[in-house]
Image (spheres, rainbow, N blue to C red):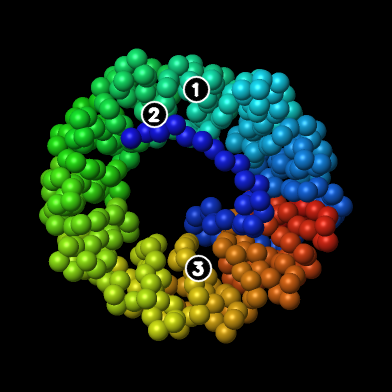
Amino acid sequence: MLKKFFYAIIVGALLSTAVSCSRQTGEPPEFTGFKTLCEATLEYAYVGEFSSGLAAVCEDGKWGYIDKTGELAIPCIFENALPFVDSAAIITVNSADVDRPYLQGLVGQDGEQLTLPEYDLIGEFKDGLAIVEKETKFGYVDTGGQLVVPCEYDAANEFSEGLAAVFKDSENMYGYIDNTGKMVIPFAYQYAYNFSEGLAAVGNNDKYGFIDAAGNVVIPLQYEYVSSFSDSLAVVASGELPKRKMGYIDKTGQETLPFEYNEAHDFRDGVALVTKEDDNDFCYIDKTGKVVARYRDYTTILDFNEGLAPVRKDGKWGFINTSGELAIKCVYEWVSENGFTDGLAMVKMDDKWGFIDKTGQEAVAIEYDVLYEYSDNLAVAVKERKFGLIDKAGLLIVPFEYDFIGYINEGTAIMKIGEKWGILELNP
């Protein structure tokens, strides 16, 4: 069932996450080096990653934005400021209204107000629209600040595959609207979920099924539980608790795996985590129901990604494939919980970090004191407490001269020397 959402803005958490997983696909570029766009002269409490050419900064508890030369483009006058999405950024200001002490709005890249700070919350943009809440009512704005869907709903979900589920107390039901606000699927369901792989789970009277984007009931509302479709299959449950059993169906509603599991999770990379009453042992199965790996055979099994999952046995880490075979021997002290991303996995051996490929060969030398996941085909590395950047071949792009490097985006990286911030241009 949909619930009203709340967005927590935790700046401290941003500082603890220097980089994110790589957002690039295909062959990585050949990096030629870097240059300093702005020396480490910026005296801000915080500098974030660049998006749409601007980065959020905090000074004396107030937030604004700088450009890539370090010049203040939008003054530090906000209580909070989030990264730009296209040409808009969410900002928070103080309000004189005791009942609504903080309000949010949108600003453009020139600092112009795209919307007045009149909303209690503005959500993340999806499909070009963001949910807004104003005095307990929900609507949607676009990145130009236009209120596309009026704040008239009592609950709303983000857009997915061009549609969003909305709820009205007067109807006591959910329906779906398109990105113009037009009601496409009328208020007819007590429960409604996001669309996934062309279908959405809906429910009435504690029975669940699936509809398509035209509102047609494709799979009857006959199950006591359903999950959204993932990897072309959905978990469904039949029977009353505590005897309820779970199985899997395809998009035609045909049962592909029988109702014999006590607990079942979505398929990913062709495998899913399940447990049965007869052995009460978690295991991974493939789409035929064959067990490919059992938890009891390892100390730990993490999620599959790109066909491999990290496993731990006898205090060492390795990787199994979706056939349950040990594809990479358990010889590492630690591995990234994300496993493989873009064909590489971060591993630790002899208290040093590097990357291996899917054959287990060392792709980037295991020689770094600290290492982070790739972002825009570059990884932050640390040696002797100094930060640098390496590419996917392990070549040093930015030398180990900085006290911090992170927030790689739009061909830039944020760095620090001492307590002062600066900006690097990558691959100039």
Kind of residue indicated by mark 2: Ala
Residue to which mark 3 is pinned: 336
Secondary structure of the residue carrying tag 1 is loop
Asked if the residue under mark 2 is in contact with the one under mark 1, i.e. CB atoms within 8 Å, the reply is no
* Mark pair 2, 3: CA separation: 35 Å
Secondary structure of the residue carrying tag 2 is strand
Residue to which mark 1 is pinned: 136
Direction from residue 136 to residue 214 in the image, left or right: left
Kind of residue indicated by mark 1: Thr
Kind of residue indicated by mark 3: Ser
* Point 37% across, 76% down: residue: 299
Using the image as rendered, state which of residue 191 and residue 249 is in the foreground: 191
* Residue 383 in which image quadrant: bottom right
**Quadrant containing the N terminus in the rendered view:** top left
* Residue 271 in sight: no
Mark 2 or mark 3: which comes first in sequence? 2
Query: What x and y, as percent, mark residue 10?
Result: 62, 46
